[in-house]
Image (spheres, coloured by chain):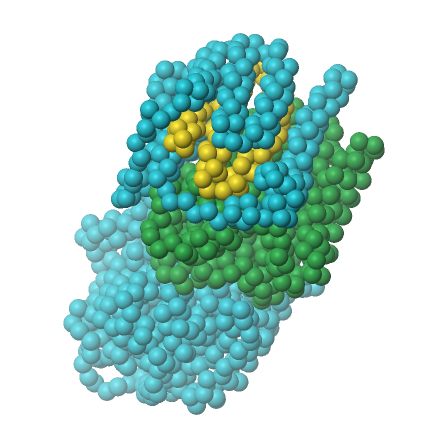
Chain colours: A cyan, B green, C yellow
Amino acid sequence: MIYAVLSGFVLALLAPALYRLSARWSGVVFSVFPAILALYFLSHMEAVVGGEAVRVAWPWMPAMGLELSFNLDGLGLLFALAITVVGTLIITYAGSYLHGHPSLPRFYLFILMFMASMLGVVLSDNLIALFIFWELTSVTSYFLIGFEHDKDTARAAALQALLVTGTGGLALMAGVLLMGQIGGSFEISALAADNAALQGHRLYPLVLALVLAGAFTKSAQVPFHFWLPSAMEAPTPVSAYLHSATMVKAGVYLLARLSPVLGGSDIWLYVVTGFGAATMLASAYQALYQTDLKKILAYSTVSVLGTLTMLIGLGDKLAIKAAMVFLMAHVLYKAALFLVAGSIDHETGTRDIRNLGGLRKTMPIICAGAAVGALSMAGLPPFFGFVGKEALYEAVTHGNLPVTVIAVLTSMLLFAVAWLAGIRPFSGAETHTPKHAHDPPWTMWLGPVFLGCLSVLFGFMPVLPEKLLSAAASSVLAKEVHMHLALWHGFNALLVLSLVTFALGVLVYWQLETIKRVTAFALPAVHRGPSHWYALWLRFLNWSAVGQTRVLQNGYLRLYLATIMTVTAVLAWYTFLTYGDVTVVAMDWGDIGVHEWVVGLVALVGAIATVRAQTFLRAVMALGVVGYSVALIFVLYGAPDLAMTQFLIETLSLILFVFVFYYMPPFKRFSRRVVIVRHAVIGTAVGAFFTLLVLVATSVQWHPTISTYFSENSYLMGQGRNIVNVILVDFRGFDTLGEITVLAVAGIGVYSLIRLRLGKGRGS
Amino acid sequence: MNPFSALTPIVLLGLTPLVLMLVISFHRSHRLAVVISLVGMALPLALLAGTATSAAPPLAPLLIIDGYALFYIGLLSTATMVVVVLSYGFLERVPGNREEFYLLLTLATFGCAVLTASNHFISFFLGLEILSVSLYGLVAYLRTTRTALESGIKYLILAAASAAFLLFGMALIYADLGTMDFTAMTSVLAAKTREPSVLLLGGFGMVIIGAGFKLAVVPFHMWAPDVYQGAPTPVTAYLTTVSKGAMVALLLRYGQYGGLLDYDSVASVLAVIAVLSMFLGNLLALLQDNLKRLLAYSSIAHLGYLLVAVIAASREGSHAVTFYLVAYFITSLGIFGIITALSDERKEADEISDYRGLFWRRPWVSGALSLMLFSLAGIPLTAGFVGKFYVLTAGVLSDLWALVILLVVSSVIGLYYYLRIIITMYLSAPEDPSSPLSATRRFSLPEGLVLAGLTVLLIWFGIYPAPLLSAIQAAVGSLA
Amino acid sequence: MLTEALTTSALLFVIGTFGVLVRRNAIIMFLCIELQLNAVNLALVAFSRYVGVEGQVFVFFVMTVAAAEAAVGLAIIISIFRHYRTVNVDNFNLLKW
């Protein structure tokens, strides 16, 4: 199984090369691969529906206790089949849809890579691996949405999609890490087996919030749903594959997969159900207002995703069963409708439903596919969509009233939307379209027709997918369940509810314009809301970035220095003031000898003179005075050797400086007065801290350690009486080497710069 | 084992500039200088393979050559070799003497090696200054261009000032603990039962300033964009990798021994620095049009991420820091390498607009660059992802929830500007054929090999990081 | 005696910090940093009288490093002066934002 997932990546990398072999039939050639995978997964059907999960594991990062483990159970198989079967149809379709497009090889590369990542998501048992594949689907979808990279809108949509799902992905990463840390394992199966520790932990709400952020962004739940309609900029095969059948379902998949781990709590019930219910109604309503065929489908997809989320949130047996049936029905009809929309766009040159009509005559095959899809979406018998809707109603009527009302309202709206998208372009009088319409080649009608046939077949014989769906529901519920599906349940309350839905749906479609007018007041709230916030947030970020850059990075060294010093002062004073036990020894002024006074004062005067100097020579001289006074203080401290060195170095640098600065002109004194004052304040704050600090130092208990070692051993080991000398020469030979190197560097720096100057002088 | 033979890697690194100096004074040859520096960096590497297993021998208190130091020396000298290769192409295009560049470069690496092996304030300070002083020269190497000189003076003044603060901090810590030896500090600190004195805390604060400056973390970061932009691109690559890496290595060791991370107040200061760096770095990079400046800002953010693992102060934290650093080295060297290799005599390829439509002219180069940027953004299958993941894990293991969440949030901003560059590359090429960036310059063989190698490593460590991880665990294990 | 020396050292450091902050002339700023290093040396010697001889050893290194830094720093400042005809750091403002 590991090869089934990973081979997709290998093939993806080879795709551009393979493409050259047969550009004409590339779509058909590449679709062989997902078809083989589909057969491979079908071959496991027997075992999986029998309740056996196929599991393989490979060590991957043993140092971190990670392994690449795949687990094929009912849920995984359901998704894997959806991915590979729809993938086969999509790739066949894309070969013709994008025929002649210069970037077609790139398309195959990314769509195959996407497919492999998507399989990875639904088959991984390891949360980390799942997350990695999850992010890969985001990245590859970014390239697929931005496929028409020269269109600004496509680029913006791709970026938006990746930012939203990427944000969610990062949240998921944090959630996964927390989950692994609290639950003690990254294996989903292990976590599901023992979820008490996780659910009882105080951080459970945080974990849940992070995971839900990941799932909701990916599955376009309100308030993150706006990216999905924008992503319709993608080529239609991409929309059909990513934005209806597979990627957007990854969030739903994650919720289903983790519901044995995280589900069952009250927060789960209310949050997941609440967001799902809000999404299903809000986007079904928004779909009514769209005129672009693909956007209508996009909003209705979001609505279905909301329904699935809501059902998983409810989490009881009926709800999960309904979710699985509904999911399968949706994959069958929505992918078909997207492909139809793509064919219409491809053949007529427009996707605006106001300009489309009467296509049944010119595109009969497409019309048949569209009709089946639309009727299934509308939830009419005998299509599989009807079975799905019945299951939904059965689940919600066992739930509570608000959810039932929302479900009925949503179904009513979707009924009208289905008509709008799937029936209207084909009915009525023929309209004038940019291109003269006719049926596309077989590669482009194969998908809708095949999926339509399945919708009809499963509608008439729901026993066919029954076992698979039962197995899927079993893995979500973590216990064995069996479901019984039928087209005809007898004359009961559910059927009445369905009939009411149809009646209302017809009413909505008939009075569409009136309803749109009357309810338009609510549109800004749902429609403009989140995407507006996204835009505002981006603008705020940009604005603050510009502001910060202008203020903080103005290129003036003085600001950089002042910032460092200010932070130092603030930090230092904070520590100092919050630190309780500070003893400052008052100085005993009388104790200081006159010579000490003199030396100290001379040093300070010299320092002040350096700072105030108006010519370079004066500054250098003043600094020299400080240096010599410091050397004198060294003498007072009984460090004559240090003092000698200091004298030598001071003299040397004095001479060096004098030579260098001899030709320099005098200069103006200071900065502007305001600047001086400001910096003086900072300087005083820093300075006062240092003064206090060293005064504190005098009250510290000393810990003589290494010095005793040196003083004890200097005569014995080094045969010398001057401790410092012995240390330098005997104990620290290597340090002296380092010292010499530093001097050498200095020399080289000067030398190379001088040489370079000379070289330039010669040149010019 | 003879303690002096343990020093061989460092001695060899120190000898390289000396040999170079001798050779330059007798015979100037660009190629020769490159070869000598490459050999000088490679020799200790070859020796490392032999000595890596041996335990830390007792040495003079200044340096400690353990597995940890050897690992970092290996990492830093490898990175230097990459920089040397990049510099060759770069320097061929500029007028003036070229050989001294390698002198300063190898010397700087010698300083870095001293830093990583340092076990004492003296070697800390010496290593840092050898590095700094060489960097002054390197940053201002193109002394006829105004921008190079400007970045040189900025780096010089700020580095010198921060070194003065660092030194003062060392003096304070020395006054409080009575020793400058890291190992001795451990025992002194262990014997202390009372609260840390204000002297010690003040000293730690000053040391953080010194280290923070080299790492370019907020609020000591302001030099970074200016210097990154003005310095020659290979030097920028060096600044962002080797110079920071050595400081991180030292910080980890000092944190382990010197008690830096044992106190809540220090840890919280570092946490504030980390959060500020992550957010400010990413925010400032958001609208940046100059690629080198953008990378400076992004590097500020990355060091912020890294600090999270440093603050974790655990074995996992040290592993995470090291792995993240390796991934960051590969990525940064790769990106700066591509910038260098794409630049020509007329123009440096440092504006994002220069990369418009690059994909259509140089698909392989832009593919590699995209991978590097993905790695910086922490997208899976790249080394950057594993690094970020490891850092987050370390944070989670040490219960640093807030930092982990903030790291995640700030990475989102990062995603935006990395993608912006990638998008630019896939746009259609500008119509103006006299585009400033010819992008027709063929890569030389060594350049191509190095960049290809970096790309392969990036993916390899992203997919199968196990070997690197176990090497790091073995090396960092010797730290504790 | 420690107190006096430390106070002197602190004051020197503060004056140096002041100078770096207030002056705009690269050379004076640089000299002020040298002043700071002198101050630290003073503190180290004062401490080492009570703590141990290590501080004095350190001072040797600080001195050499300061000399090295001064040499390279001056070299850079000189080449800046030759190029810009000024060493006022406020004039170096090409690199920003």
* Residue B300 screen position, x and y as percent: 48, 43
User: Residue A483 appears in which quarter of the rendering?
Assistant: bottom left
Q: Is residue A715 visible?
A: yes
Q: Nearer the viewer, residue A201 or A305?
A: A201
* Residue B314 screen position, x and y as percent: 45, 60
Residue shown at the point (38%, 54%) measured from the top left: B192
* Residue B327 screen position, x and y as percent: 56, 54
- Identify whether A444 is placed above or below B167: below
Q: Nearer the viewer, residue B146 or C86?
A: C86
- Identify whether B356 is placed above or below A709: above
Q: Nearer the viewer, residue A679 or C31?
A: C31
Report the side of A328 relative to A439 (left or right): left
User: Residue A581 appears in which quarter of the rendering?
Assistant: top left
Q: Nearer the viewer, residue A86 or B96?
A: B96
Report the side of A299 relative to C26 (left or right): left
Residue shown at the point (52%, 45%) measured from the top left: A707
Q: Is residue A428 visible?
A: no
Residue shown at the point (36%, 22%) measured from the top left: A680
